Amino acid sequence: MNESIIRDLIKYMDVEDNAAIQYIQTEHRMKLGLFWGIQEGSRVLEIGCGQGDTTAVLAHLVGEHGYVHGVDIASEDYGAPLTVGEAAAKLRRSPLGDRIRMDYNFDILSDQAQFAENEFDVIVLSHCSWYLKSFDELAQILSKVRAWGHQLCFAEWDARVTDVSQLSHWLSVLIQSQVECYKENSFSNVRTLFTPEDIQELVSTAGWTMKEETSIHSPELQDGRWETEMTLAEAPAELKLLPIPDKVKTLLLSELKLLRTHYTSGLESPLGTYAMVAKKK
């Protein structure tokens, strides 16, 4: 992987104070883009583009004759200390800007969200599915976008633990997804837990045929630690406020104790990333 390309890409984002972190994040997304086989000249629709971590990589891969349209349901002022709108504006002012469009407050399932049949070569959903409210929401998205593109490229954390050092990340995800069952509204990172098997079933039911899949490991990613620290900080207060049955609450408190034990052991690395490519049936 070309280090100079990654360093150029992170210069295009407003991350001067976090360049080391962004390098690791961008390197991971380059692994995904290369696995997906994004071709020069491709037209890409990216759902859940956020601040543009994956968008920048996709824009590099499609080249000057390609195009990336990123959409996200979040508002432009979402995120801190840098909002997604501010990050996107910096990216659009970069040398990649003329091949990028990013729209926020964009509900992909609304009647207003419409594109022409086969307008895109590739539909991308990368590390965004766990933010969705339900299985039904992802099923509807996968079904609706099928008319708009030829190929589906998907990535999400792989809930299949392969090493004991991943247990902190896994427990954090498990705790968050269980607490979510008792929330009416949420801003959590994990709102619905999809396993690789869940994804395979939903993709097939929506009319796509699996072409290739893999698990990509990027052990330097900071996300596992971030999720663990957030869960340990926020879950105890949520357990006091939410209408959770006592027996479930006791179970979650025990899981939090296990999480704290694993976290303090110093053994921490993120889960792998489940990545797949599918074609229309």
Image (cartoon, rainbow, N blue to C red):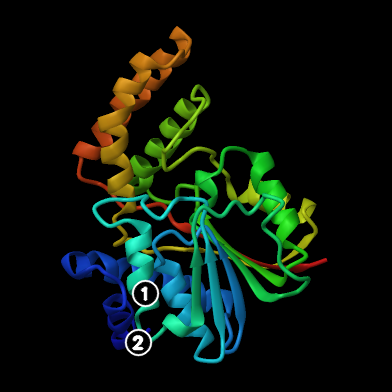
Looking at this view, is 140 or 166 the one in front? 140
Looking at this view, is 72 or 128 the one in front? 72
Total marks in image? 2
Instruction: Classify the position of the C terminus by image quarter.
Output: bottom right
Q: Position of residue 145 (x, y in %)?
A: 71, 61
Report the amino acid beneath label 1.
Answer: Leu
Looking at this view, is 51 or 235 the one in front? 51
Q: As drawn, is 168 to the left or to the right of 124?
A: left
The residue singled out by tag 1 in the image is 91
Residue 214 in which image quadrant: bottom right
Q: In the structure shown, which secondary structural element does the residue marked by tag 1 occupy?
A: helix
Q: Position of residue 117 (x, y in %)?
A: 78, 71
Q: Nearer the viewer, mark 2 or mark 1?
A: 1
Report the amino acid beneath label 2.
Answer: Asn
In the picture as drawn, the residue positioned furthest to the bottom comes out as 65
Q: Position of residue 159 (x, y in %)?
A: 50, 46
